[in-house]
Amino acid sequence: PRVIENAEGSRTTPSVVAFTADGERLVGMPAKRQSVTNAKNTFYATKRLIGRKFDDPETQKDMKLVSYKIVKASNGDAWLEANGKVYSPSQIGAFVLIKMKETAESYLGKKVKDAVITVPAYFNDSQRQATKDAGQIAGLNVVRTINEPTAAALAYGINKSEGKVVAVYDLGGGTFDVSILEISKEGVFEVKSTNGDTFLGGEDFDNALVNYLANEFKKDQGIDVSKDIMAMQRLKEAAEKAKIELSSAAQTDVNLPYLTMDSGGPKHMNMKLTRAKFESLVADLVKRTIEPCMKAMKDAQVKSSEIDEIILVGGMTRMPRVQETVQEIFGKQPTKSVNPDEAVAVGAAIQGGVFTSDVKDVLLLDVTPLSLGIETLGGVFTKLIGRNTTIPTKKSQVFSTAADGQTQVEIKVCQGEREMASDNKMLGQFTLVGIPPAPRGIPQIEVTFDIDANGIVHVSARDKGTGKEQQIVIRSSGGLSKEDIENMVRQAEKFAEEDRKKKEVIESVNQAESIIHDTESKMEEYKAQLPEEDCNSLREKISKTRKVLANKDNVTPEAIKDATNELQQASL
């Protein structure tokens, strides 16, 4: 597989989306570059909000850290606001996917419809569903969602001839995953266990450094910049840059002229930051990755000595302290044979190749990261499918009524590892109606849970007495409805149309300017041979074209083309 460069010439695209004051949408590096001057309308790290409720503790924590506004949608989900318009995190994800789609289309020279999308292994059902929605909004047919560590293992193990047990340690921008896999020499990739933290990543490392820099500045200058959005955004950029530099250098300078002002004039930040200081600031974050690794090994029933290779994924694994921690956990040096930024994309491409039969002899057996079950009497969580069960999987259980003459049963579906249902993530609930009245405990209701290869849950219920069956779509109280998605698809198409028009205007303007320049230089070159009236006529046409260009925001590409053609005809 080949990783394609985007329009800016880079093989990785930051998941940043911005809206400018005049409604233009920017994606990737162009969005990131203007974030300091447009912090309120620049969305980053939205993957942490995908599939989450506004009232989730993680969302509440995030609200204190990001420069944009997080709002509560009518269904209780966490949405985002820019320039008075609201967007779901799935929509922001879709804008990034559209850019990826366009990048692939311009390289391949044909339309791209199908996609394999990777997700953190520790994502729950709501987060996976919201990621699939993002694909749909972007106009893609999501053939499969695949877990990121599994994809990285595919990239690593695709041409290996011997069997191995590998651990994938994936510390990205927003999330952390660890998976243990067994790769057989026949090409079977079997995930033994997975664990993680969907709220731990490079963002947290940046934030720890931002807080430190802001506090040092306050000590030094007596000014608190924590409420100054623009200053904080500059600190964030500087923190990210310093973090990257400290992976290869022992110390770096954080130099921010004109960070803020007071009555005494402008204030600058200029301080040295050592790698040791940075490591002490983020020690707790690095430590948080240890327990999931230990749990994953325990669940997979392997000792660290039985793991043959450790694969590092995600930009944060370039940090020396992270690499040392991985070595302490697993007792050996991680392999350097995998590009931490590209391995996941390459693995997803291999999985795509399996679907199109371009890749043979590869079988992927993944697992569900969290236990699935229902709430039973007393609010207890009864697990039906345990975590790390190989998917796709199906499990049925027979339930009955709790009262005499009961004609309906309500079933609440939850996902998580806690003993009480209320402490786990409630995926949704449904009611099976039409049960013939009978003494309690007599009706036999068989509920079947089905987790597909994407890790998404489907449920059906059957009254064994009447044979009445009901396919149930888990309707969580949040998530996007079919209408929401259709509206967002239309919105995305509208943006694409606007982008196309803008591009057309820019191209027409460029062409017009180039023809004006050519005409003027030719007039200069041949002025001795050209009759005066021809020169005047050309000058008139040039002036007319320039007037149209001066008003380019309010005229159609056709008007620019007409003026240009007229000038071109006259100059022949």
Image (tube, rainbow, N blue to C red):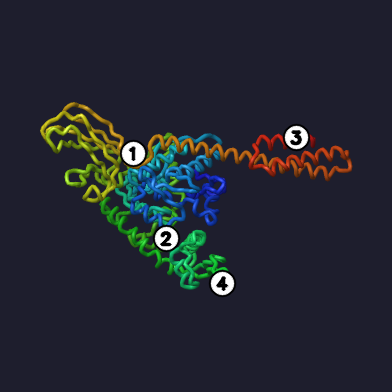
Q: Name the residue under label 2.
A: 205
Q: Mark 4 points at which residue?
A: 264
Residue 141 location, x and y as percent?
A: 43, 35
Disc 3 from disc 1: Cα separation? 60 Å
**Mark 1 or mark 2, earlier in chain:** 2
Residue 449 location, x and y as percent?
A: 26, 37
Q: Which of the 4 image quarters holds residue 276?
A: bottom left
Residue 169 location, x and y as percent?
A: 37, 54
- Which dot, 4 or 1, sits closer to the camera? 4
Q: What amino acid is labelled 4 in the image?
A: Gly
Q: Mark 3 points at which residue?
A: 566
Mark number, residue 453 = 1
Query: Is residue 196 left or right of 106 when viewed as pictured?
Result: left
Q: What amino acid is labelled 2 in the image?
A: Phe
- Which dot, 4 or 3, sits closer to the camera? 4
**Mark 3 or mark 1, earlier in chain:** 1
